[in-house]
Image (spheres, rainbow, N blue to C red):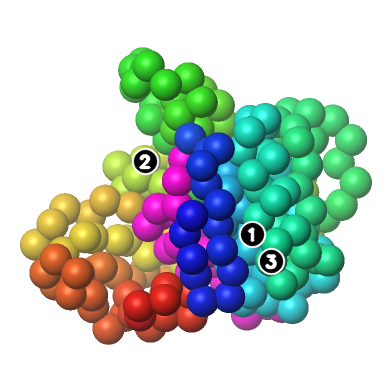
Amino acid sequence: MFSFKQFTIQQDKCAMKVGTDGVLLGAWAPVDHNPYSILDIGAGTGLIALMLAQRSHAEQVDAIEIDDEAYEQCVDNFEESPWSDRLFCYHAGLDEFMEEPEDEYDLIVSNPPFYSEDYTSGNESRDKARFETSLPFEDLAEAASILLSDAGVLAVIIPYKEEARFVAVARENELYPVKITRVKGTPTAETKRSLIAFSRTETLDPAFDELVIETARHIYTEPYIALTQDFYLKM
């Protein structure tokens, strides 16, 4: 179990536990355009959808999850939250969900599986959760291009080394970066992650910034505290 300030995540059935990537995306994804409807692709525990329900006034916060046990856990976490009337999880893969898309979304988020190497850990559900064969970038970008409303935003967190490739794939689907935040664990560490927001409108000069998480072990930076303090109990 992982307790946040306004909700609790049960995660004993999920291969992918609560982690920094999910918290970063849930806290960072743009909501200043006041999304009415939100979709989390590959929900896992439901963490990101719950964070966005807390941060926004969206009437509809949907999620999709293909793994049986993760789906059940996500539904339980949604039902136990203060926003259960706004949250709904579909038990489906993205390809199934796209067969008869009914809704447009003002914000689509995904913390996609992103190990593209031909490697398995021996834990099938963890592999499915982590490895890109479960959700290729191309499929995610194509789905977003279909499901996003005209003024909608797609927000993802991916490995920094995949940033250029994902931006190129998104561009092929007429989605363009408007903001990129590159994440480092410490000031001297290599850049590990890219948080990227896309829209349908091409911007010649997308906003770039950098986020450093810690200056030393458990000594968090002011920007990281500001980003996450509405969620973490000890922030």
C-alpha distance separating marks 2 and 1: 24 Å
| Residue at x 78%, y 29% (from the top left corner) | 96
> Can residue 45 be seen by looking at this rendering?
yes
**Of marks 2 and 1, the one in the foreground:** 1
Amino acid marked by disc 1: Ala
Which numbered dot is residue 49? 1
Q: Amino acid at mark 2?
A: Glu
The three-letter code of the residue at mark 3 reads Ser
Disc number lying in front (2 or 3): 3
Q: Is 131 situated above or below 17?
A: above
Left or right: 65 in relation to 192: right
| 3 or 1: tag closer to the N-terminus | 1
- Give the spatial CA distance, label 2 vs label 3: 34 Å
Q: Quadrant of the C terminus?
A: bottom left
Mark 3 or 1, which is nearer the eye? 3
Residue 35 visible at all:
no
Query: Which residue is labeled 3 in the image?
Result: 81
Q: Is 28 part of what is drawn in magenta?
A: yes
Q: Verify CB contact (< 8 Å) between mark 3 and mark 1.
A: no
Give whichever of discs 2 and 1 has the lower sequence position.
Answer: 1
Give the residues drawn in magenta, as a range.
16-35
Instruction: Tell me which residue sits at (87%, 52%) in the image.
Output: 103
Where residue 44 appears, as percent x and y from the top left, is 58, 44
Give the secondary structure at mark 1. Answer: helix
| Residue 7: % across, % down | 59, 69
**What residue is shown at x 64% (from left), y 74% (from top)?**
54
**Residue 207, label in figure:** none
Which numbered marker is on residue 162? 2
